[in-house]
Image (cartoon, helix red, strand yellow):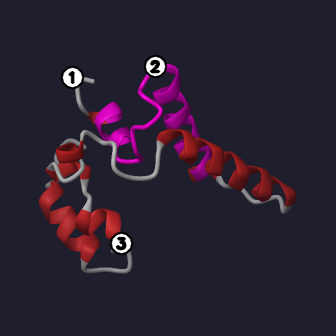
Amino acid sequence: MQGLDLRKFTEVLNSSSGSCWSSSNYNPVFGMAAKNHYHQGFSCNLMVKDLGLALQAASTVASDASMARAAEAQYLSMQRQGSPANKDFSGLYKYVYCKDR
């Protein structure tokens, strides 16, 4: 996310329709999730399972679901790299953007 001021982005996100609990209370960018070592919330394995179910449902109605497919690919990659199954959804940020993974 080169060139993007993440604090400003988060401020805009949290004051718009994009606001959600995970962004305002558990934002991995600012260390909220890191305090719990990415183990607090909805696990990576459950996210993969649910994304798979959502993609199955989307295929029955010919929905594009390209964002869900992209998200599933990232979580599957995180799983294959041996990330602990109990890492939560915020662990994906660390997996994708942190060099010390």
Which element carries disc 1, helix, strand or loop?
Answer: loop
Image: 17 above or below 38: below
Q: Residues within 10 Å of mark 3 (few under 14, many from 20)?
A: few
Q: CA distance from mark 3 to mark 2?
A: 29 Å
Image: 59 above or below 84: below
- The residue positioned 24% from the left and 68% from the top of the image is 24
Measuring from the top left, give residue 43's x and y in whole percent. Answer: 47, 45
Q: CA distance from mark 1 to mark 2?
A: 13 Å
- Check residue 76 in the rendering and tell me which mark sits there, or answer none: none
Q: Is residue 75 magenta?
A: yes
Type of amino acid at the residue the image marks with label 1: Asp
Q: Is residue 80 left or right of residue 18?
A: right
- Check residue 20 in the rendering and tell me which mark sits there, or answer none: 3
Q: Which residue was labeled with disc 1?
A: 100
Measuring from the top left, give residue 69's x and y in whole percent. Answer: 62, 44
- The residue positioned 14% from the left and 64% from the top of the image is 8
Q: Residues within 10 Å of mark 1 (few under 14, many from 20)?
A: few
Q: Which residue was labeled with disc 2?
A: 81
User: Which residue ends up furthest to the right in the rendered image?
Assistant: 60
Residue in front for this viewpoint, 22 or 86: 86
Q: Which residues are magenta?
A: 68-96
Type of amino acid at the residue the image marks with label 2: Gln
Type of amino acid at the residue the image marks with label 3: Cys
